[in-house]
Image (cartoon, rainbow, N blue to C red):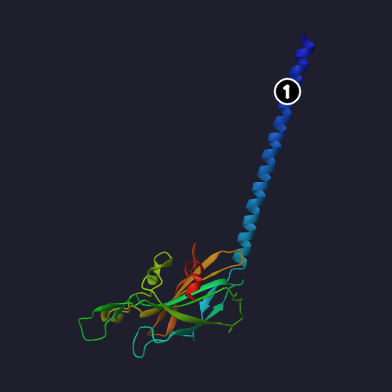
Amino acid sequence: MNILGLIGAIAGIIGTLTGIGGLWIAFRANKFTRDQAKKQDEKIAQYRAEDNRPELVPIADKKPQFAEDHTWLDVSKIDQFLALSNTGKGNAYNLGSVLMGSETYVVPGPPPQTRMPNDGYYWMRRSAVPIIPGTSGFQSDQKLHQYRDLRKGNIEIVEGQKLYAPPEPMLGESIRGTPMLTARYTITYRDEFGNKYAGIFDFNYNEQIWYATVLQEKVATDLFDLFAPEEH
């Protein structure tokens, strides 16, 4: 091969490599652009979710029904009637809610005081009907139906928080100021993007008000997932 032919061959190889390099750079640039666009879309979706997030809270004047002159929920009530308000900006979907009493109760009688376990009764609602944001005074009435299962109370939707309300305090604890939180209303719901949220509200028996133990927290699993439709 003469020198001119060799130079031509080398030039051809260089041209091919340059073309391949150009294609690789174009591919990388295109992939980078796609990745950036995906991240941007994710950020926009996150901002939209934050901007349109629902927030469910119980209505103050809708209270659990307790057994007469006792701190435990009235198990003779097949249904409990509560109400929710959506104080957020977006619709709340796939509601799951559970009302449950204390994990243990103080046995009535003279000292020394002893405890008795929760007997497994709870009231629950599962609904796909959206709860829309409302102006002041708007409420969504909730009818929770009674079930019984000793295993359900130990479920933790939010880490460290069971479906059970806290154990009823002993007399000495009450005197020292421990609140009498003897009913727990656990609520889960989703936003329009499928994000799942939980709220946990404990009812103070002495003060007759709801306490927000967990106002709102993102969760991986919700009550709508956990409670099978055949239960309702």
Which residue is painted at 60% across and 60% down in the image? 46
Mark 1 crowdedness (10 Å alpha carbons): few <14, some 14-19, many ≥20:
few
Is residue 74 positioned above or below 24 on the image? below
Q: Position of residue 10 (x, y in %)?
A: 74, 18
Which quadrant would residue 28 be assigned to in this image? Answer: top right
Query: Does residue 187 appear in the picture of this structure?
Result: no
Q: Position of residue 131 (x, y in %)?
A: 59, 76
Left or right side of 110 for 183: right
Which residue is painted at 75% across and 13% down in the image? 6
Query: Does residue 191 appear in the picture of this structure?
Result: yes
Q: Residue furthest front?
A: 230
Which quadrant would residue 42 be assigned to in this image? Answer: bottom right
Instruction: Give the residue number, with chain letter if any, for mark 1.
Output: 14
Is residue 39 positioned above or below 194 on the image? above
Q: Position of residue 91 (x, y in %)?
A: 61, 72
Q: Nearer the viewer, residue 176 or 65?
A: 65
**Amino acid bearing label 1:** Ile
